[in-house]
Amino acid sequence: MYRRPVASLRMNTKKRRKSKGLRRAVLALWAIVAAIALSGCPCINSIVNNDPNLRWWAFKTYGADRLCPEMLKASVPLKLQEQSPTIGRYFPTTCSYQINEANRTVLVSVGGGGYAYFPTVKRIGFTLNVTVEYAFDFRLTDEGAWVWGQLSRTVNGPDFRMTSSENPLVDLATVVTPAGPAANLVGSQVVTGFIARGFTVVETDAGKEFSLGILPPGKHPFKPVQVDEDDEAYTFANETADIYSGERDWLGPYEIADDDQLIRLRGNLVGNAVDVFLVQKTLGDLWRTNYQGGAVGPPPGNPISVSALQPGAFTRTFKAPPGLYYVVIDNTSTAGATNPPFVLPNPLFESAARLSYVSQLIEE
């Protein structure tokens, strides 16, 4: 699950300073690195990588307490297949962990809710709670750090419950998608699939990247929008999302840590025009909770900004005080000035605006 700078992170255009910030952000290993460096050894990465006892001690001492704060800042994109567009998201809202010293694992309990869109069924809202045991490990390289969470076992759940359906006449359990039964897809193949496959967090000077599954050191997640290697922005997400007519999508949450930072969204929109809202996380969570419950209304408060996004290439920047924010993509007629075009019902095709984008944190 993705991703973001803590309040102490500071964007800087000098790569020398960014490299120092990188090592502070990855498992707080400076204490270990400093101790080894003072001993006169030039092979810091090799020593840490080759000693499982040191890796476990480093993780439980400096990394375990970062798990839940990072998870609660994140959302999980839901997809029919690995590189297919996003059709919904899961948002963790509760998280706790316990360290199992004997097994060298971490017990993680996560609860939350989300939304997903399927043809015929249309939008559904759901909750999901699960407790799993992860075996954690990492490797330091000259490029950065690869941190893994690999499932050891499922302790409880997943407890998946559908809370709303845009089409109340359809039983989710009877709907079959190209990837299998919809109930299994949402409850198991999507969210639980994320948990069961584990995840990789890649931390380099270019930012933090998240991927389902275990990526070996040196391998990076698939990116639908190419980012210039010389671009020194911090990357939050790089993906494609389908926002169907009458629906919306919450991108983020994204964290602004300094007054001189901006959120930048750039990419390409195919289909009809949509509205783009910037909202504070607290307001966005309330708006999203209503949406997951079946209500498709305007935001329950004043957004920081709202603008229309036309089809084609685009760049948007958002200025706001330090804090957590959502960028909400709206393809409805109940918020904003842009209305999706009327489309006759078609069981074989449903109209969607396809957004391929990269979201980044940049300096003014």
Image (cartoon, grey):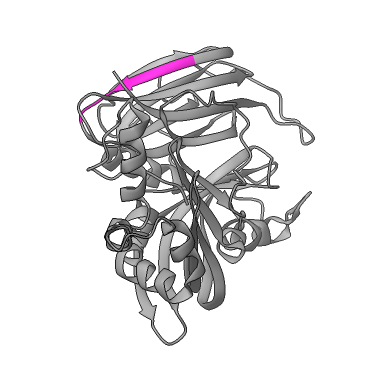
Q: Is residue 74 left or right of residue 49?
A: left
Percent x, y of residue 214: 61, 58
**Is residue 361 visible in the rendered structure shown here?**
yes
* Observer able to see residue 123: no
Report the predominant secondary structure element of the magenta stretch: strand
Extreme residue toward the front, this view: 40
Provide residue 103's location: percent of width, then percent of height: 47, 84
Foreground residue, 1 or 54? Answer: 54
Residue in view at x 50 percent, y 43 percent: 143
Q: Is residue 68 above or below residue 152?
A: above
Question: Left or right: 171 with respect to 346?
Answer: left
Relative side of 191 to 236, left or right: right
Q: Which residue is drawn at the image coordinates 31% and 58% (left, top)?
A: 37
Q: Quadrant of the C terminus?
A: top left
Q: Nearer the viewer, residue 156 or 330?
A: 156
For residue 242, side relative to residue 42 (left or right) = right
Residue at position x 60%, y 47% in the image: 218
Of residues 26 and 1, which is closer to you in this image?
26
Decide: is 156 above or below 74: below
Instruction: Count the marks.
Output: 0
Q: Which residues are magenta?
A: 315-321
For the point 37% across and 31% down, which residue is it? 15
Q: Quadrant of residue 41?
A: bottom left
Q: Is residue 24 magenta?
A: no
**21 to 272, vertically: above or below:** below
- Residue 283: x and y in percent read 28, 38
Image quadrant where residue 359 sits: top left
Q: Position of residue 291 (x, y in %)?
A: 43, 42
Q: Quick check: is 317 in the magenta stretch?
A: yes
